[in-house]
Image (cartoon, coloured by chain):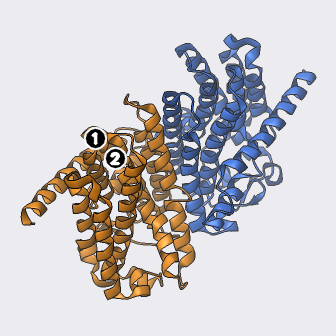
Chain colours: A orange, B blue
Amino acid sequence: MTTRMTTFAIWMKTVQEDMEQALAAHLPSLNEVPARLHEAMRYATLDGGKRVRPLLVFAAGDLFGADAQTLARAGAAVEMIHAYSLVHDDMPCMDDDALRRGKPTVHVKYDEATALLVGDALQAQAFLILSEDVGGDAKRQVAMLRLLAHAAGSVGMCGGQAIDLASVGKALSLPELEQMHRLKTGALLRAAVMLGAWCGKTLTDGEIKALDQYAAAIGLAFQVVDDILDATADSAALGKTAGKDAADNKPTYVSILGLEASKVLAEKLRSDAHRAVEQFGNQAQRLRDLADFVVQRKA
Amino acid sequence: MTTRMTTFAIWMKTVQEDMEQALAAHLPSLNEVPARLHEAMRYATLDGGKRVRPLLVFAAGDLFGADAQTLARAGAAVEMIHAYSLVHDDMPCMDDDALRRGKPTVHVKYDEATALLVGDALQAQAFLILSEDVGGDAKRQVAMLRLLAHAAGSVGMCGGQAIDLASVGKALSLPELEQMHRLKTGALLRAAVMLGAWCGKTLTDGEIKALDQYAAAIGLAFQVVDDILDATADSAALGKTAGKDAADNKPTYVSILGLEASKVLAEKLRSDAHRAVEQFGNQAQRLRDLADFVVQRKA
């Protein structure tokens, strides 16, 4: 166990460092006009976060022998969609948060208009990266673009945000809460898994189904643990304002199920994720490690 | 002349009506969750505007025999990028405008958070439409996605917005003003022309160069005329608040060149646009008509 976790920790660190380089390379340069916008885009994206989505891209890609450069491109695209959503989510008209990844949020560091444009430009940049002319199978490339657009849009991440907005102060049922998170964070986490796998090969229906089940389980686990941490950790550990959900009167797993039942649910989802990728045997070790990481993280 | 303009007017009305149908079909349905977000996306996009970008898509597509359904898809994608940019541009942290196309802006009709999400989701929807699985040449489809992402992003439309923001209250030179508009509105108008042409065939370098010159000329002409109208028309005719640029202390062609010289420039750009597509002969009549329309419009 210790040896495996050490191997995983080394793998994770390597992917995170490679992703930092890939993101830096795939973001517009400071030498390009408009420099201030590009500086703010880099501020919003670089040097921060656990890079959970790129880690999923790489773990799923390893399963099907994808090459590192293709995975880095897909990872950068997904991470830019995630980064843009954080920038917009932190704005005064949304969550109004001043702290993100231990740093001032973009609208605090720059201004609101810049934060709006940073998010807009990062979204376009994500699609630009995925549509780069890199040879290879153009049909699969179109499918990957479609997958990301679907996951990012009104029946994916943006839709989840809209449901989240509408749910403030309301008593959601557990299925309603699940639906919100399936869109808000689940859709992009699923896209990360699928994009990574597609970097390796065109998937069979059976493989898609298994990866879907895996992604659904860790997507929900991720959110349950987020809610547990928001209720139990402090801001310094989280790098963002803790206790926001309760203060904002937002429904969470903890507020609906209680803390202990939430922890039990997180564990159950971890086993679900493991079971979903059983058919892939040892090759899926990184996906299992990531499920453990998502549930056992402290921030 | 009269006969030709009548033919053009009929063509324009037909394309506008077809586009309204295409946009309605390509936007998420009100029956899909989240319904309120989808309603607001439809409010922001349907029933309004001259549809200049889709008109350019169709005019350029006609030149190379593109089929109507493919053009409608490309037109809808470009128009959704344009619609999202208007929603975000009208927000309080940007231009803070309450009126657009004669109707309350999205953040006034709904709320700011919804306006933010409407814009974000419309951008994703544009890329979703262009990445639909419609058979055909996947390599060209990827190139069209790349073209749109480039035109929408930080060295295109968003970059132009950022330069615009930074220019408020500053004395821009004419080349600086041109650079701003080349990005802010020119990039997407160019994308409309190119996407339309690519719907028909893969272009030669000579054809790309000619269309580029045409697009650059009408892109600037469009902005010069916008500035003239902002200084001379009233809000009722424009369907948006007139005189905003002067009130916001924004540099415009009128403020830099004066009204008469701006009118002369608009006419020169119209001839430039005509000359650029001379090689295409009669086939380019719609592109010439559109250049006339852009310069002679009253709103």
- Would you say B41 lies left or right of B290 here? left
Q: Between residues B260 and A289, which one lies in front from this camera angle?
A: A289
On residue A66, the disc is: 1
Q: Between residues B94 and A45, which one lies in front from this camera angle?
A: A45
Quadrant housing residue A215: bottom left
| Residue located at (48% from left, 80% from top) | A174
Q: Can you see residue A80?
A: no
Quadrant housing residue B228: top right
Q: Are marks 1 and 2 in contact (CB under 8 Å)?
A: yes
Please state, as top left, top right, bottom left or bottom right, where the N terminus of chain B lies in the image: top right
> Marks 1/2: CA distance?
8 Å
- Would you say B222 lies left or right of A250 here? right
Q: What kind of element bears circle 2?
A: helix
On residue A161, the disc is: none
> How far across and how far down the image is residue A186, in percent?
42, 63
**Three-letter amino acid code at disc 1?**
Ala
Quadrant housing residue A268: bottom left
Disc 2: host chain:
A
Disc 1: host chain:
A
> How far across and how far down the image is residue A168, in percent?
53, 80
Residue picked out by circle 2: A197
| Residue located at (60% from left, 21% from top) | B201
**Three-letter amino acid code at disc 2?**
Ala
